[in-house]
Image (cartoon, grey):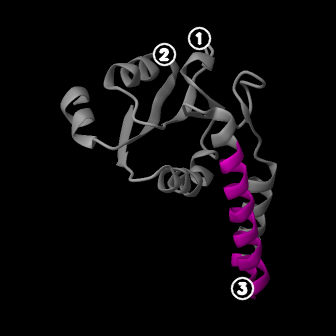
Amino acid sequence: MYLDIRSFDTSEKASLDISRHLPRRVRIGPVAIIADRPIIFLSVLRKRWTKIIAEVQRQYASTLDARKKASLHAEVQLLEKMSFSLMRKDPHTGVAVADLTDLPLLQHYQTIYMYDDPDPETLKKIRDDHLSTHGLIVAYTRNPKLYIDNLL
């Protein structure tokens, strides 16, 4: 298991960080995002995802290098076919957004983003019950020292 503890000042910074980190993680396997208000978070994430696709398309249109163009085209195709949903509606989507009560018991994820200061005990339970072998948990917190003291 890998743990990445990230601090944030505002929810805007955390959601921006997730949307920038997410494109690399979806290639590896299923992703879950645990948030206290999943419907709102999903809406914000979809808007940011649309902007990411537009940025990659802009880069594609502005390059003449054939190898770079092919790489950017593949990136756009991957980003466009990614699916997002609320966990309770479709737990097998590429990126599932849920609160703690929506996680299915036997579902495992390669990457789990824990948003809104999860307590260390909850983080341990999520790790044990829902994280794949060699998976990554990214915990967003206002108090990183709390996690370092309790998890390491």
Q: Within 10 Å of the Cα at label 3, are there few (<14), some (14-19), or many (20+) other Cα atoms? A: few
Name the element at disc 2.
Answer: helix
In the image, 43 versus 111, the foreground residue is 43
Residue 109, position as x, y percentages in the image: 57, 29
The residue at 41%/17% (across/down) is 125
In the image, 66 versus 78, the foreground residue is 78
Name the element at disc 1.
Answer: loop
Q: Within 10 Å of the Cα at label 1, are there few (<14), some (14-19), or many (20+) other Cα atoms? A: few
Residue 104 shown in magenta? no
Q: Which mark is residue 65?
A: 3
Question: What residue span does the magenta drawing correspond to?
Answer: 43-68
Mark 1 in CB contact with mark 3 (< 8 angstroms): no
Q: Could you tell me how far apart the alpha carbons at marks 2 and 3 are, in whole angstroms?
A: 46 Å
Q: Which mark is residue 48?
A: none
The residue at 64%/47% (across/down) is 27
Q: Is residue 37 above or below residue 54?
A: above
The residue at 74%/55% (across/down) is 79
Residue 97, position as x, y percentages in the image: 64, 33
**Marker count (numbered):** 3
Lower sequence index among marks 2 and 1: 1
Q: Main secondary structure of the magenta part?
A: helix
Residue 41, position as x, y percentages in the image: 63, 42
Q: Is residue 119 above or below residue 22?
A: above
**Label 3 is placed on what type of residue?**
Asp
Residue 16 placement, left or right of 80:
left
Name the element at disc 3.
Answer: loop
Residue 7, position as x, y percentages in the image: 35, 49
Mark 2 in CB contact with mark 1 (< 8 angstroms): yes
Residue on which the image places disc 2: 129
Q: Could you tell me how far apart the alpha carbons at marks 1 and 3 are, in whole angstroms?
A: 47 Å
Whether residue 139 is visible = yes
